[in-house]
Image (cartoon, rainbow, N blue to C red):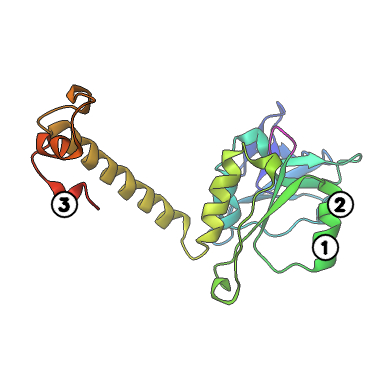
Amino acid sequence: MLYAHDELGQLIEARKGAIAYCPGCGSQVRPKCGAIVTHHWAHVNGGDCDAWSEPESDWHKGWKEYFPMYCREVVMGEHNEHRADVRLDNGLVIELQHSSISPETIAEREQFYGSMVWLFDAREFAKNVYISSYKDASLADLSVVESIEKASNAAEISVKEFRERQTEFEQALQKVNARIASLPIAVTEIGFGETAYSLIDAFGGEKDCFLA
């Protein structure tokens, strides 16, 4: 469990000396802030009130931080029995799965959460699987789903590498915009009667870059 309630009921991350309580059962939890394992909260009385709880990793933490705090580790169920890794405003649950999981457990969680998608950490076996992409029509307006699809289809790319590639794209786009700004005539200044080659000539006669 990466997040717990402080004495004011606000979600906080584990830090040494902090006092907090489990969002599910309300019992006190203690911070685990060692040098090896990802910082997390553990129940003082031992165990975990969520039977589906698994050890958290930096991979889990990295994905959860893409979403607002109130969407992370949302307690669900009539008796607060489970914590969804991520739950969006429209009720869609995103389960982050780093370790192996049985088909029976998958079916159980899907039945419990209802509207949900899985995000698997496939870095160790990405070369052995074929990833097909599809999108339910009901999710078409969710940009977060599109982002997850792009990231999962490039399973071997780490979050850091993904951000570096995004930066490279933004830099390339800036260069293109700078090139357009340096052209001798604006497109809006070309009359509708101009031919294609007149347009090319107006931009310096660089025909090859237009006739790709």
Residue 111's disc number: 2
Near-viewer residue (185 or 124): 185
15 lies left or right of 99 = left
Q: What is the C-alpha distance between the residues marked 3 and 1?
A: 58 Å
> Would residue 19 be seen by someone viewing this image from the given angle?
no
Near-viewer residue (109 or 210): 210
Looking at the picture, does residue 100 appear above or below residue 71?
below
**Mark 1: few, some, or many residues within 10 Å (few <14, many ≥20)?**
few
Can you tell which of label 1 and label 2 is closer to the viewer? 2
87 lies left or right of 51 = left
Kindly identify the residue that appears in the image at 84 percent across and 60 percent down. Answer: 107
Q: Residues in magenta?
A: 87-91
Residue 61's disc number: none
Near-viewer residue (169 or 101): 169
Q: Is residue 89 magenta?
A: yes
Three-letter amino acid code at the position of disc 2: Gln
Residue on which the image places disc 1: 105
Which secondary structure lies at badge 1?
A: helix
Residue 53: % across, % down: 76, 55
Residue on which the image places disc 3: 208
Three-letter amino acid code at the position of disc 1: Thr
Can you tell which of label 2 and label 3 is closer to the viewer? 3
Residue 17: % across, % down: 62, 41
**Mark 2: few, some, or many residues within 10 Å (few <14, many ≥20)?**
few
Return the disc, 3 or 1, that comes first in the chain's sequence. Answer: 1
Q: Is residue 63 magenta?
A: no
Q: What is the C-alpha distance between the residues marked 2 and 3?
A: 57 Å
Near-viewer residue (13 or 86): 86
Residue 195: % across, % down: 19, 35
Q: Residue furthest bottom?
A: 128
Kindly identify the residue that appears in the image at 74 percent across and 48 percent down. Answer: 116
Q: What is the C-alpha distance between the residues marked 1 and 2?
A: 10 Å
